[in-house]
Image (cartoon, helix red, strand yellow):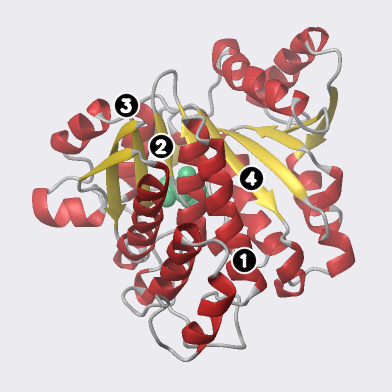
Amino acid sequence: MKLNIAVLPGDGIGPEVTAQAVKVLKAIAMEFNHVFTFDYGLVGQSAIDKTGGALPEETIALCEKADAILFGAIGDAKYNNDPLAKIRPEQGLLGLRKTLDLFADVRPVIAYEDILDKSSLKKKQIKDTNILIYRELAGGIYFGDKTFSDDGNTASDICKYSRFEIERIAHLAFEAAKTRKNKLTLVDKANVLASSKLWRKVVQDMEPQYPDVTVNYMYIDKAAMELAINPRQFDVILTENMFGDILSELAGVIVGSIGLLASASFGENKAMFQPIHGAYNKDENKGIANPIAAILSAAMLLDHFELFDEASLVREGVNKSLKLHITTPDLNTKYEHITTIKVGDFIEDFINNPDETNLNFTNIHLGQSTII
Ligand code: IPM
Ligand code: MN
């Protein structure tokens, strides 16, 4: 298969983790005789520094002509104390989501057996957790009208949804539930918010179209607690933009590190793949950023093009790295010298040679090349 992939590494640790995802995709292309080409574009602070804006026209054009987009991370800590800045790196990501109408964000949350002890939650509570979060991504409070009064003392954000916007993602979430445990949980705040009342009504109206799927309705405050106490009860979670942002980051606690959480954002005819974590500027170029979320996002890219064997080989490589503790320090107190690049090299080696990776394990821990 020929694929042209737009790569937007972004800021902070974005370029480091994205480089590992590209490395893995190149290994897959080699192993399975595909032709993947990679074209790089600017986004976020790195785009602001070079062009003055977070989402240059060339980047949009690059994404529009690409088959898929691989995104790193964006953000810069210097805005932490400058909330009123007119131009911000986040505008790059939000602009892409809006321009390409990437309305459905899929965020898998899987508690890996080999690292259950890395979670701050109890092993027996998180074991076998496997959740798929469907986060609406192109609407809601993120994109509603915003006001800021001239005197600087009053501000507002509108959270607006239409039946159409809810239905199009809800259909995808129902369909996903059908291929899993047939359980869908709509997370909302329908006891208070008008937009949430509409979400609940629309999903209720859709229920008869999916007789096999059991739908639960849960308020966001309760869902946050339930996710921490008993995450196993969830199968597919469907929710609006901001609730999905918060819940998916909370899910990082379940799996042991946010550095493991991948995502795929879909529009009608575009798809973007992105680790859910941010840019962590203070960790930039230290070699400690976990590349697995980026690598698993690349696996989701392969799934999207129905390259299922390829995607499972990547996931096997990830599982093996977790099993052998070939992971960055966020998950690894045992072998602290394992860097971002070494994790990428290990998974690349695994793809090239799935049967011999146990041998390479010794070399990795000696700090040598993984190539025998
Ligand atoms: C995410 C991020 C973004 C979001 C930020 C960087 C705008 O946190 O993808 O989860 O809030 O959606
Ligand atoms: Mn987030």
Amino acid beneath label 4: Pro
Earlier residue among tags 1 and 3: 3
Up-down relation of residue 156 to residue 165 (above or below): below
CB within 8 Å, label 1 to label 3: no
Choose the circle earlier in sequence order: 4 or 3: 3
Within 10 Å of disc 3 (Cα), the crowding (few <14, some 14-19, many 20+) is few
Foreground disc of the pair 1, 4? 1
Query: Which residue is label 2 attached to?
Result: 272
Q: Who's the residue at 73% across and 17% down the image?
A: 203
Res 146 quadrant in image: top left
Q: What x and y, as percent, mark residue 112?
A: 71, 61
Tags 4 and 2 touching, CB below 8 Å:
no
Residue at left 79%, top 68%? Answer: 121
Closer mark to the observer between disc 1 and disc 2: 1
Give the amino acid type for the residue marked by disc 1 in the picture. Answer: Lys
Label 3 sits on what residue type? Answer: Thr
Q: Nearer the viewer, mark 4 or mark 3?
A: 4
Can the viewer see residue 241? yes
Tell me how far mark 4 sits from mark 3, CA to CA.
Answer: 24 Å
Residue nearest the observer in this picture, 247 or 275: 275
Percent coordinates x, y for residue 267 in the rendering: 44, 24
The amino acid type, in three-letter code, at marker 2 is Met
| CB contact under 8 Å: marks 2 and 3 | no
Q: Which residue is mark 1?
A: 320
Of callouts 4 and 2, the N-terminal one: 4
Tag 2: Cα neighbours inside 10 Å, few (<14), some, or many (≥20)?
many
Q: Residue at x 59, y 75 (%)?
A: 358
User: Of marks 1 and 4, which one's residue comes earlier in the chain?
Assistant: 4
Q: Secondary structure at mark 3?
A: helix
Asked if the residue under mark 3 is in contact with the one under mark 4, i.e. CB atoms within 8 Å, the reply is no
Callout 4: SS:
strand
